[in-house]
Amino acid sequence: MLILIKGAGDLASGIACCLIRAGHQVVMTEIGCPTVVRRTVSFAVAVEQGSARVEDIEGRLAAGPEQALAWARQGLAAVLVDPETACLKVLNPPVLVDAVIAKYNTGTHKHDAPLVIAIGPGFVAGKDCHAVIESQRGPCLGQVLWSGSAEPNSGVPGEVMGYAAERIIRAPDSGEFIPLAAIGDLVAAGQPVGRVGDQVVKAGLTGMVRGMLAPGTPVTKGLKSGDIDPRIQPRLCYHISDKAQAIGRGVLQVIATFGGTDHD
């Protein structure tokens, strides 16, 4: 069936890959200048480059809803620049997935589609949507919630090899972010990895750059702009995360249970 996903970042893209591999057709919406860190696993890169590949699946930027639908029918991840999700009225998808991961509801309503699924905190299942998928790492990651809300955002990045906050590269100031290292690069603790104007941000640990904003991306001070992985495994830069896969399985579970029919 046709599934519309709001957002095309790494988690949304992981969900899209799960859905396409299960035989569904996927259209994704994005903003005009995505602040995507894990660019090697995000269909949002198609906004800038016209196309993007995540593992074995190709994504393409569509000029409008009709073209997006045609590409989705070909097994591609179709991407639309549509911050207001205006395509919703044109496509009338049986399923809508809000995977913006904004930590709050940016405007999704339960009646937007016969089946509405929301990812992470900021939504109440049964009120804002039909089901919420837990996005917090831990034993409940990917769990389907038919009532209530997901765990609130802790503000603490997931721990990898004992590192948490040190893994994240944050914009040192507001302005245009300029990366000083690329995804896949090895960096040492204290090495400059990005700048905004004259303000430089340095690596908090030794590891491999797993994510980095595109050059010239507008940022506000403190915005997540990159990600360093201490495991130094190149494949982790180019494969969907276990977190995205767990959330994708949760979305598939909801769709299999409800089949996109009306459950108001």
Image (spheres, helix red, strand yellow):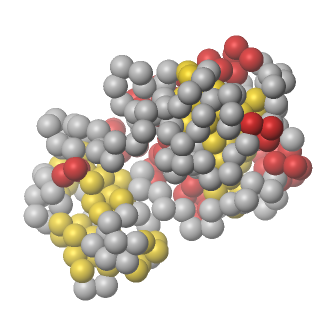
Q: How many marks?
A: 0
* Residue 25 can be seen, yes or no: no
- Quick one: quadrant of the C terminus? top right
| Residue 162: % across, % down | 14, 37
Q: Identify which residue is drawn at 50% across, 21% down.
A: 143
Q: Which residue is nearer to you in this view: 29 or 101?
A: 101
| Residue 218: % across, % down | 46, 74
Residue lying furthest bottom in this view? 198
Q: Which residue is nearer to you in this view: 135 or 109?
A: 109
Which quadrant would residue 168 be assigned to in this image?
bottom left
Answer left or right for 69 relative to 52.
right
| Residue 28: % across, % down | 68, 47
Which quadrant would residue 139 be assigned to in this image?
top left
Q: Which residue is nearer to you in this view: 184 or 211?
A: 211
| Residue 65: % across, % down | 83, 53
91 shown above or below 219 = above
Q: Which residue is nearer to you in this view: 212 or 139?
A: 139
Q: Identify which residue is drawn at 42% across, 39% down.
A: 152
72 shown above or below 259 = below
Q: Identify which residue is drawn at 22% across, 37% down.
A: 160
Residue lying furthest top in this view? 257
- Quick one: quadrant of the N terminus? top right
* Residue 107 can be seen, yes or no: yes
Q: Identify which residue is drawn at 69% across, 46% down.
A: 108
Answer left or right for 207 relative to 119.
left
